[in-house]
Amino acid sequence: MSALPEATGRTVALTIDGRDVAVPEGATLLSACRAAEIATPTLCFLETLTPVNTCRVCVVEVEGSRALVPACSRPAESGMVVSTDSERVRHSRKMVLEFLASSVDMSLAGAEIHAWMETYGADPGRYGATAETVAQPPKVQDELYVRDYSKCILCYKCVQACGVEAQNTFAIAVAGRGFDARISTEYDVTLPDSACVYCGNCIGVCPTGALIFKTEFDMRREGTWDESRQSVTRTVCAYCGVGCNLDLHVQDNRIVKVTSPLDHDVTSGHLCIKGRFGWRHVQAGLDEPAGPVPAPDTGPGSSIESPPDRRPAS
Ligand code: SF4
Ligand code: SF4
Ligand code: FES
């Protein structure tokens, strides 16, 4: 859950881009910008997670401050004079977006991120290099979800969602340092061998499509994924009494993935394996042949790894 400060009932007054803005004490500069309807790019920020300041795309200029400050985590203070559209801010945001897009496949990042790249004139090909740590094939290990770290911008959101901010499972973390930093299970074991409980909360927060439902992954490969033909229907998960809200994404009368609204006051968009993945029975016989799920292809050339043999020795 977000660790933003508790409301104190007091307000602070500041100036943003020449406008007078008043926000509750403890609010961040990002909240103040939003209150003033000043659009601000974010990548590693999510309302339901504690800000970690890893991407720095949200930076703003504060009068009297030597360095640009991240709007997503810096609390607003009375009397601050903030610029969000100065040459320095625009240059910095452009550089952040260019560095990321030059080294990582951002093709599945949200439309908003692409709009920001256009706004700041970020050229994805400018540096023409792919980071070593992300140059790896997608990890396809089962029929639930795929990890394609060639699209990972190391925003840490998945690590937060898997850890203390939601799931408390700690199946994934940042491994390595510097250019070798990457998201990994412990000792890079396969998901079934890790502590992962397949809640999919990491997928729910990933901004770049690095973590993706297997259904979406397959449909994109086949060229059949078409969001313009998809509708989203909100319902309540029927598996237990918690009452999690589910958003069913439906294309051609088939559920293709399930998300959960961030503003749900019980779950904050997080689900368990049943809500996230337990919907295939709804369309049994429609999109799959009857019978058991076929065994994954683990033959030569496949990126699927064989599960460990856990049978007791005879
Ligand atoms: S599916 Fe859940 S438990 Fe598994 S890595 Fe993602 S957040 Fe962690
Ligand atoms: S996998 Fe996604 S959520 Fe996790 S660090 Fe990479 S981009 Fe962020
Ligand atoms: S969104 Fe503020 S540092 Fe990433």
Image (spheres, rainbow, N blue to C red):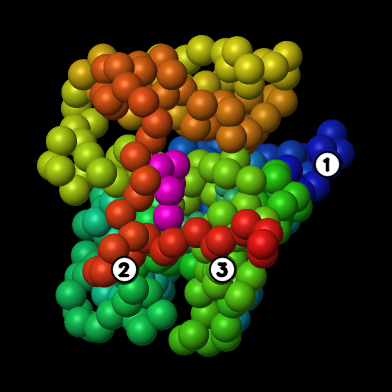
Crowdedness near tag 3: few (<14), some (14–19) or many (≥20) residues, C-alpha within 10 Å: few
Classified by dominant secondary structure, the portion drawn in magenta counts as loop
Q: Amino acid at mark 1?
A: Glu
Residue at the location (41% across, 80% down)? 133
Which image quadrant for residue 282? top left
Q: Amino acid at mark 2?
A: Pro
Numbered badge on residue 101: none
- Above or below 135: residue 20: above
Residue hosting label 1: 6
Tag 1 near tag 3, CB within 8 Å: no
* Left or right for 314, reference 146: right
Which image quadrant for residue 95? bottom left
Q: Would residue 121 be seen by someone viewing this image from the given angle? A: yes
Crowdedness near tag 2: few (<14), some (14–19) or many (≥20) residues, C-alpha within 10 Å: few
Q: Label 3's element?
A: loop
Q: Label 1's element?
A: loop
Residue hosting label 2: 137
Is residue 231 or residue 212 the one in the foreground?
Answer: 212
Tell me the quadrant of the picture where the N terminus can be found: top right
Residue hosting label 3: 189
Crowdedness near tag 1: few (<14), some (14–19) or many (≥20) residues, C-alpha within 10 Å: few
Residue at the location (25% across, 44% down)? 218
Question: Which residue of the protein is positioned furthest toward the right in this rendering?
Answer: 8
**Front tag of 3 and 2:** 3
Which image quadrant for residue 123? bottom left
> What's the magenta region?
141-145
Residue at the location (46% across, 86% down)? 179
